[in-house]
Image (tube, rainbow, N blue to C red):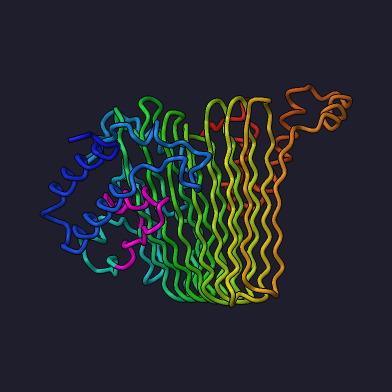
């Protein structure tokens, strides 16, 4: 038999299914099997697929990654990373190491009645939540191989349920740490649901130990009922030899509000997709992002917004700061469906190149099937303004500091959109660090 690029995943999956056979419900075993068959059918994406045209994932994705069935916390590396990842002790916190929940490092303060913040594996064991329909993501798209792979290995992650009318007064911090030796992979699946008129802030942080490259393949699913309000932050600090692929799916109903704040600093190759379905009227969605690759890093940011109903507003601003031989990709798609009259959609992508060898590929897209809309998109790519540098130096400011001030000013409007002080201060520290790299 000829070996294929998915064989290592298949072997790991067979062992995973065997290990899970005594505890997994029948529906989950079947879901995993169908998803693995779909992943095998699709294979690792190539640059021949339009959505992967600028991102060659094969050199990393075809390594013999192994799924981690159990974890050891004895060497202290995970705890050290946890201390670096913490933002505020007052936050509710769920901690995962190599994809497995660590109860002793997680903490919850007093919660309003009906609020659930727990890990997915516990929810599966309890069988008390409607997980079957929520975990069965559609993977018909030829570019969705990694969605299928996540479903094949789905086991743990965060489950957040906020009932109708409840507004949490503390953010929920989800921390994902990778520390195992060798090429390992984890597949977090996060389910976030806000009831009618409820509100919350959620932060996802991803980071790992330097050494052998690992693979994080994460999915977050968000459901917002009428008038729900979610502030969602993602901080990607993976180590510099790792592969990070993630997708976030948002389903919004009438008068809900969603704000996404994405910040990417780590990983050798990071690809983040955000897919918003505006399935109601009077919806507001805001997508802000900042990616800062250096060295040989590649960061691929993709967003898709579907305006399915009338009278909705979306605002999108993504900025990239690229140095050395780094590469960046931005692809923002806005689809205005035929019934989505009175749509107001604005999209902007701006990139700052700090090196002659840095490259960015940007592709803003609008597809409009309604006639009463206001839609704009644009992209700019440039360098630091020499006149501005000269002005600052003429005022006695040293060249390195002047350069840093201009970089900070370029990124600051994205950072200032973050309303949680601990998160904003964390980001400002990164921007002001001596080499422009995160010190989490």
**Image position, residue 1 (x, y; %):** 17, 35
Q: Is residue 183 visible?
A: yes
Left or right of 35: which side holds 190?
right
Where residue 419 sits, quadrant-wise, is bottom right
Point 61% across, 77% down: residue: 310
Q: Position of residue 35 (x, y in %)?
A: 27, 55
The residue lying furthest to the left in this view is 22
* Frontmost residue, 317 versus 161: 317
Q: Residue at x 57, y 69 (%)?
A: 307
Q: Residue at x 28, y 40 (%)?
A: 6
Q: Is residue 155 visible?
A: no
Residue 346 in the image: above or below residue 153: below
Q: Quadrant of residue 243?
A: top left
Figure disc tally: 0
- Which of these two is toward me, 180 or 199? 180
Q: Is residue 143 shown in magenta? A: yes
The residue segment tinted magenta is 133-158
Tell me: 126 left or right of 269: left
Vertical position of residue 232 compared to residue 353: above or below: below
Q: Residue at x 54, y 69 (%)?
A: 278
Query: In this view of the protein, which residue sits in the foreground, 62 or 210?
Result: 62
Q: In the image, is residue 218 part of the stretch drawn in magenta?
A: no
Give the vertical position of 41 relative to 283 (above or below): above
Position in image of residue 284 (x %, y %)? 61, 68
Image coordinates for residue 20, horizontal then vertical, percent: 16, 51
């Amino acid at each position: 038999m000829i070996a294929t690029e998915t064989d290592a995943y298949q072997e790991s999956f067979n062992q995973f299914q065997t290990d899970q056979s005594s505890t997994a419900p029948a529906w989950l075993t079947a879901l995993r099997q169908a998803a693995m068959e779909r992943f095998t059918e699709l294979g690792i994406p190539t640059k021949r697929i339009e959505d992967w045209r600028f991102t060659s994932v094969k050199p990393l994705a075809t390594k013999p990654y192994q799924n981690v069935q159990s974890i050891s916390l004895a060497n202290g590396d995970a705890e050290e990373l946890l201390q670096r990842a913490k933002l505020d002790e007052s936050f509710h916190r769920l901690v995962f190491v190599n994809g497995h929940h660590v109860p002793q490092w997680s903490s919850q303060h007093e919660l309003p009645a009906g609020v659930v913040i727990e890990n997915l594996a516990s929810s599966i064991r309890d069988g008390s939540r409607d997980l079957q329909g929520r975990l069965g993501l559609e993977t018909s798209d030829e570019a969705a191989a990694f969605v299928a792979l996540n479903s094949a290995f789905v086991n743990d992650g965060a489950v957040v349920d906020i009932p109708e009318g409840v507004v949490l007064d503390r953010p929920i911090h989800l921390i994902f740490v990778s520390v195992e030796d060798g090429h390992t992979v984890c597949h977090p699946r996060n389910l976030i649901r806000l009831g009618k008129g409820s509100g919350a802030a959620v932060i996802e942080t991803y980071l790992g130990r330097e050494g052998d490259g690992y693979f994080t393949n994460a999915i977050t699913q968000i459901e917002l009922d009428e008038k729900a309000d979610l502030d969602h932050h993602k901080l990607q600090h993976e180590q510099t030899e790792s592969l990070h692929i993630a997708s976030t799916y948002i389903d919004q109903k009438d008068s809900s509000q969603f704000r996404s704040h994405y910040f990417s600093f780590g990983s050798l190759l990071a690809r983040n997709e955000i897919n918003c379905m505006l399935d109601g009227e009077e919806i507001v969605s805001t997508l802000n992002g900042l990616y800062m690759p250096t060295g040989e890093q590649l960061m691929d940011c993709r967003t898709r917004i579907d305006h399915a109903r009338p009278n909705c507003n979306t605002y999108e601003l993504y900025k990239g700061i690229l140095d050395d031989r780094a590469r960046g990709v931005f692809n923002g798609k806005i689809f205005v469906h035929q019934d989505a009259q009175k749509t107001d959609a604005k999209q902007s992508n701006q990139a700052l190149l700090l090196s002659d060898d840095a490259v960015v590929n940007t592709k803003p897209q609008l597809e409009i099937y309604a006639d009463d809309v206001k839609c704009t998109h644009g992209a700019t790519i440039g360098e630091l303004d020499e006149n501005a540098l000269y002005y600052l130096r003429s005022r006695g400011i040293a060249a390195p500091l002047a350069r840093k001030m201009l970089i900070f000013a370029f990124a600051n409007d994205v950072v200032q959109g973050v309303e949680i002080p601990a998160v904003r201060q964390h980001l400002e520290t990164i921007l002001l660090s001596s080499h422009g790299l995160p010190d989490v």
